[in-house]
Structure formats: structure tokens, C-alpha cells
Amino acid sequence: MLVMLAACASNGSTLAAVTPATTTAPPTTGSAPPTTGTPPTGSPASTTAAPAPATTGPTGAPTSTAAPSAPPSATSSATSGGLEVTLTATPSRVAPGAVVQFSLSAREAQARGALGYQISYGDGTSDQIAVPLVCLGGAGSVRAQAWPLTHRYAGAGVFRVSATVTATCTSDHATAVVSLTVT
């Protein structure tokens, strides 16, 4: 918008005819809301929000809030040939019915096919992704894949979660194992 105003001004037209009454910045994800207002003559519009006021305690002294600590997690890695597998469970200690988030990732150095997984949650349930049995010719290339998974445990106990990743068209398969506690 500012470039257009400069172009209009060099054309000889008056700025008052093209200056909007208010300016609004487009919303951006993860930032402060846009500000509105009329910029002073000759100044660009401001899209920066004012800093948040400092938090003070009952005595008027500034207070500091510690960042919340991350929930405990359990992580395991395994390798086979050119295949590297990592499994993370967060949190590693939960109440029955709570959601556990699993992050399963794999990287194959010389993939000539797809990557697939099978995970056993340790409570009699499992999940898997089907992989096509199509192989590419040649030496292959690096292939990486990540799968975000969630699971709820109905009852208390210590559960051994194992995830096996296979790389089709190779003999590479690796299993990562983590344990978590439901209390």
C-alpha cells in the first residue's frame, strides 16, 4: 500500500484522495493482533502492537513466571543397515484414559521403496500402515518419514510399546521399544 501511495504522489494526484481512513495489517499466525489507526502525515503505518505491560506482584515489584516444564517422555532408537528408527512416547507416565502421543520417525539411507510401520501398544492393540511393494531401480536415495500417533490406555500398568519400521525392497527393518506407566 505504501508503494502505491508513493506512486500516486509522484503522479501529481493528491494523497488525501487515496489515503485510507484506517490501516489494518493482515493477521499473522503466532503474533500479536494488528493495530489500527491513522498514521501521521508522511509516516508509514505501524503494524507493531505495543509491548505487553509488565506483570507485578502485590508489592508492585515485577514478577517472573517460570516456563512450564515439559512432561516426561521415553525415547528409543534402533538401526538396521541404512535404516534409523526413533520412537518417543509423551508423557511416559499418565492416568488411565489420558492421551499418550507417540512420535515414530524413520530414515533410510538407500531407499528403493516405501517405509512402513507396525506398532504394538502393549495392551493388546496395535496399528500399522500398509506399504506398496513397488521398488525403484538404481541405487536408491535417502527417504525419511514421520508418523504422529496417539493412544489411550484404559487400565493401569506398565506397558511395553514396540514399533517396527521396514523399508521395502531392502532387508532393513528396525524395532524401537519404550516403556510407559499408567497409574
Image (spheres, rainbow, N blue to C red):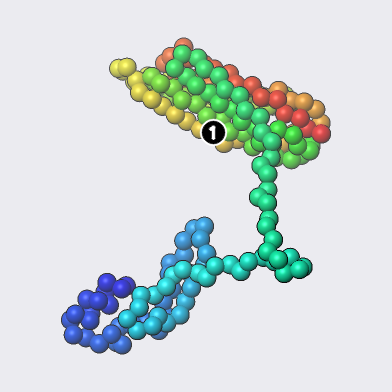
Q: Residue at the location (65% across, 50% down)?
A: 67
Q: Name the side, left or right, on which 153 lies relative to 169.
A: right
- Give the residue furthest to the top: 171
At which x and y percent is residue 169? 42, 16
Give the amino acid at mark 1: Trp
Q: Residue at the location (25% across, 87% down)?
A: 14
- Give the residue furthest to the left: 11
Q: Name the side, left or right, on which 92 lies relative to 50.
A: right
From where the camera sits, is residue 174 visible? yes
Q: Residue at the location (57% across, 22% down)?
A: 77
**46 lies above or below 20:** above
Q: Quadrant of residue 111?
A: top left
From where the camera sits, is residue 128 visible? no
Q: Which residue is mark 1?
A: 147
At which x and y percent is residue 183? 81, 34
**18 lies above or below 74:** below
Between 106 and 60, the one nearer to me in the picture:
60
**91 lies above or below 80:** below
At which x and y percent is residue 68? 68, 48
At which x and y percent is residue 88? 61, 30
Quadrant placement of the N terminus: bottom left
